[in-house]
Image (cartoon, coloured by chain):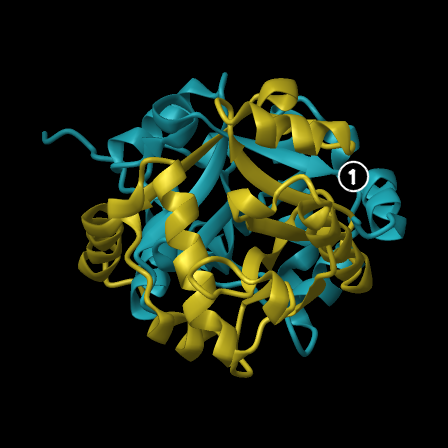
Chain colours: A cyan, B yellow
Amino acid sequence: MSAQQARPLAVSIRPCCAQDCAQVMRLIRELAEFEKVPEQVKISDQGLCNDGFCDDPFYKCLVAEVQPEDRSKAGPAIVGYGLYFFTYSTWKGRNIYMEDLYVMPEFRGQGIGKRLMSRIAQIGVEKGCTQMKLSVLDWNRSAIDFYLSKGAVDLTATEGWHVFRFEAEAMRQLALGQPGE
Amino acid sequence: MFYTIRPWAVRDVKEVVRLIKEGAAFHKALDQVKTTSEDFIKDGFGKETTFGCLVAEVPPEEKTKEGHTIIGYQFHYLTYCTWDGPILFGEDLYVAPDFRGKGIGTSLLNQVAKIALEKGCSQFRFISTQWNKSATDFFTKRGAVNVTDYNRWLVAHLEGEHVRKMAEYCVKKQEPK
């Protein structure tokens, strides 16, 4: 008798639609929980939907959806997402920025993350982007290893690049600031 | 010294490219600059543009030895944070060395902060090299937080053939478009 081989779940990668936003928000909150800062998530389901589906969307998003034949009764349909937008490098021109890449832990190990990231890369290449940028927490070893294995370069380690932010109050102070002499 | 801060126009692009190269040379990365004036003109002024640029201009009587009146710029674009919503991102802030210490960098920053607020952004983010002390001091003195040190975020990218290889995997998997 031959050994039974479990086949991978049937999962499709498709663009997010407005109706998916509540599910994507669930995954955003899961990711923030993993990153140890769940209280940092300030946007709402409605906010995410407005920002992604208005006349001038701020982002694009892909979702990984378990196909009906493999969906469990109480289980989620949307099990992963990749959120991205287009930026520009003064040195290299068109860029694609992958803001979030997340697959629910119980659905990992099946190549879903790689498929999401590849589709984003393909979209970038189609639009003439020569770079794909991202950020990752320095303690998130499995994510760092995943990206490094795909050819990513840690620019903080190799070139000393750091991210800075001005938060709301500091920005308001700057905006009110007197022009220089 | 009198100067103006304004959004760039097509006529400014060549000058900004000159300043981009000066900034890259300072980062010992002049060989990494592949953008041309044609790229910025094609991508920077249509309906689909994803970025903006402010320039600092001095009057003709203050021009540089080589005759340039555009002596600084700030390059920015809209990004999105799944925690905070829209964020304005600053790619470069540069003032030619002979024109520093006169408040031009501050004025560029003031103006981009106004743009960030007008666009409904809750933050203005940017990157700077850790070893560029005068730049990091300039920003932190004005209220910037070093997110890499404080929150441990690393900056990374995939370039050229690595992006293409990822894209080709997608084709091999025959993902529907």
| Total number of numbered discs in the rendering | 1
Q: Image quarter for residue B23? A: top left
Left or right of B109? Residue A44 is: right
Image quadrant in which the N terminus of chain A is located: top left
Q: Position of residue A160 (x, y in %)?
A: 43, 25
Tell me if mark 1 has few (under 14), some (14-19) or many (20+) residues whose alpha carbon lies within 10 angstroms of its own: some
Instruction: From this view, report whether residue A175 is shown above or below residue A170.
Output: below
Name the one closer to the observer, B69 or A167: B69
Q: Mark 1 lies on which chain?
A: A
Q: Which residue lies furthest to the left in this view?
A: A1
Q: Relative to the observer, which residue lies in front, B106 or A114?
A: B106
Instruction: Identify the residue shown where x is 90% and y is 51%.
Output: A176
Residue A71 seen: no
Tell whether B91 sits left or right of B116: left
Give x and y (percent) for residue A62.
49, 58
Q: Which amino acid does label 1 sit on?
A: Glu
Dot 1 corresponds to which residue?
A167
Q: Which residue is drawn at 62% across and 67% down?
A: B61
In front here: A137 or A163?
Answer: A163
SS for callout 1: loop
Percent x, y of residue A93 = 37, 61
Q: Is residue B43 above or below residue A108?
A: below
Q: Position of residue B170 (x, y in %)?
A: 26, 57
Regarding residue B95, the answer to whether it shows in the image is yes
